Amino acid sequence: MSEGQTVAATDGTEVKMTITESAQEYLAELLAKQGDDVLGVRVFITQPGTPKAETCIAYCRDGDAKEDDIQIPYPKLTIYVETRSVPFLEDATVDYAKDRMGGQLTIKAPNSRLPRVNENSPLEDRVNYILYNEVNPSLAAHGGEVSLVEITEEKFAILKFGGGCQGCGMVDVTLKEGVEKSLIEQIPELAGVRDMTDHTNTENAYFK
């Protein structure tokens, strides 16, 4: 497959991501040094669509690949792309440039932090969208922030407060009347929110 080509999966999903020939060669060399349980390389984005989005490349060992991962075969390696990350990887580029120190692998994903979220997006992405685009701008006035830790099987959003919200005497009101109300109004299938913050640390609290 040539670099930059749009790839269509069996379900019609398309991935438009460039992996340069030099990056392919470099990744293939790394894979050759691994054990037989390494199937290829997996590409995914953590916290996609948020200011904290990070594009990651990791070895894909036997058992690491997800059922809905999109497999992209290159001449010397196979790339596994997380389906959830596909829209955020559009126009992404993976490159390898040699230098005096040996070389460096670079990943540029200009759309990784854009809020490409709709009603069909994963629950985690929709919660993150509301937290970063609606809730956190309000909390910023008090020097605070809130982030999603995980979504439980019972569909509770586990949250962690930071900055002026950690140890704040009004955090329960913020949690129930602000954050939970905003989330459930827009995501009815969410069962509720739970706070896992250690509020014994009141050093930066807005309300002591």
Image (cartoon, grey):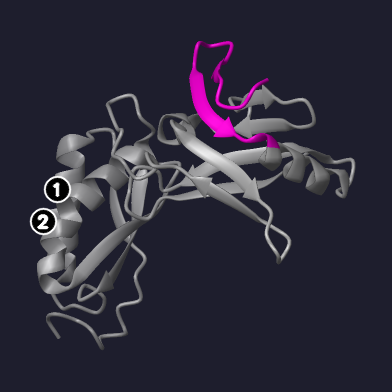
Percent across and percent down for residue 3 are 61, 27
CB contact under 8 Å: marks 2 and 1: yes
Q: Label 2's element?
A: helix
Instruction: Judge whether residue 61 is colored magenta.
Output: no
The amino acid type, in three-letter code, at marker 1 is Lys
User: Above or below — where is 202 with respect to 179?
Assistant: below
Label 2 CA crowd tier, 10 Å (few <14, some 14–19, many 20+):
few
Query: In 3D space, how far apart are the residues under numbered discs 2 and 1 (Cα atoms)?
Result: 6 Å
- Residue 181 image label: 1
Instruction: Judge whether residue 7 is colored magenta.
Output: yes
User: Above or below — where is 54 with respect to 170?
Assistant: above
User: Above or below — where is 40 with respect to 34?
Assistant: above
Who is closer to the viewer here, 111 or 123? 111
Percent across and percent down for residue 158 are 36, 55
> For the C terminus, which image quadrant?
bottom left
50 vs 131, left or right, is right
Percent across and percent down for residue 64 are 69, 40
Give the labeled residue for mark 2: 177
192 vs 109, left or right, is left
Image: magenta residue range: 1-21
Q: Residue at x 34, y 49 (%)?
A: 157
Q: Residue at x 41, y 35 (%)?
A: 88
Percent across and percent down for residue 197 are 34, 70
The amino acid type, in three-letter code, at marker 2 is Glu
134 vs 158, left or right, is left
Who is closer to the viewer here, 156 or 203? 203
